[in-house]
Image: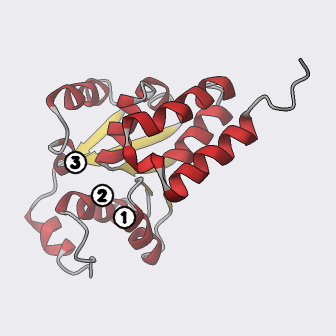
């Protein structure tokens, strides 16, 4: 089974896109940190605590030893303490996948030879596992720019357009 450590932005997007339930049905052992949980709004945190209660999410409370070990990692200045905790936990778990839509997090994870993916990989997994249809994911892709301005421009916008074309029904005869 794949093991992944998830940051706040992935959780927030999945909750806002109303696909958090299928996400937790993936065959992935999911982890995060207390720091990440504390970034969330109360309602978002309650949703994740429900998955924690049924052992679908493991939330790690890093201790003094962990923070001492984290100080040895040459993190870029732009990484928050929460993002650092995700990368550290991924390393501690033996190279777990880092799930983040934050480019700096993904780039630094890659520099440490940690596997990393973002929201589009999650959508791929939901389709491949049969938890969401391509039609449902296209609806989700169309909603993404409305819930997060990050998806309105640049590479994120292009990735949405590419996937809509890939999964769309443009070749269907009418």
The x, y position of residue 158, in whole percent, is 60, 53
Label 1 sits on a secondary structure element that is helix
Tell me whether the residue at label 2 lies in contact with that at label 3, contact meaning CB atoms closer than 8 angstroms: yes
Residue position for label 2: 86
| Disc ID at residue 105 | 1
Comparing 152 with 10, the one in front is: 152
Kindly identify the residue that appears in the image at 68 percent across and 29 percent down: 134
Tell me whether the residue at label 1 lies in contact with that at label 2, contact meaning CB atoms closer than 8 angstroms: yes
The x, y position of residue 86, in whole percent, is 30, 58
- Residue 1 seen in the figure: no
Mark 3, other Cα within 10 Å: few <14 / some 14–19 / many ≥20: many
Kindly identify the residue that appears in the image at 46 percent across and 37 percent down: 144
Splitting the image into 4 quarters, where does residue 130 fall?
top right
Task: Say whether disc 2 or disc 3 marks the residue closer to the N-terminus.
Answer: 3
Task: Say whether disc 1 or disc 3 marks the residue closer to the N-terminus.
Answer: 3
Q: Is residue 150 left or right of residue 38?
A: right
Q: Is residue 65 above or below residue 120?
A: below
Q: Is residue 148 above or below residue 88?
A: above
Task: Say whether disc 1 or disc 2 marks the residue closer to the N-terminus.
Answer: 2
Label 3 sits on a secondary structure element that is helix
The x, y position of residue 97, in whole percent, is 46, 56
Q: Which part of the image, by quadrant, shows the C terminus?
A: top right
Residue position for label 3: 36
């Amino acid at each position: 089974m794949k093991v992944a450590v998830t940051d706040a932005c992935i959780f927030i997007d999945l909750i806002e896109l109303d696909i958090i339930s299928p996400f937790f049905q993936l065959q992935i052992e999911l982890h995060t940190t207390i720091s990440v949980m504390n970034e969330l709004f109360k309602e978002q945190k309650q949703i994740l605590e429900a998955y924690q209660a049924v052992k679908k999410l493991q939330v790690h409370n890093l201790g003094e030893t962990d923070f001492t070990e984290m100080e040895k990692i040459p993190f870029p200045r732009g990484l928050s303490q929460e993002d650092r905790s995700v990368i550290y936990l991924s390393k501690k778990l033996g190279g777990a996948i880092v799930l983040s839509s934050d480019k700096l997090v993904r780039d630094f994870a890659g520099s440490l030879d940690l596997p990393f993916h973002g929201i589009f990989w999650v959508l791929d997994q939901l389709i491949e596992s049969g938890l969401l249809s391509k039609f449902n994911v296209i609806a989700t892709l169309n909603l993404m720019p409305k819930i997060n301005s990050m998806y309105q421009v640049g590479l994120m916008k292009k990735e949405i357009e590419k996937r809509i074309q890939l999964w769309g029904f443009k070749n269907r005869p009418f």
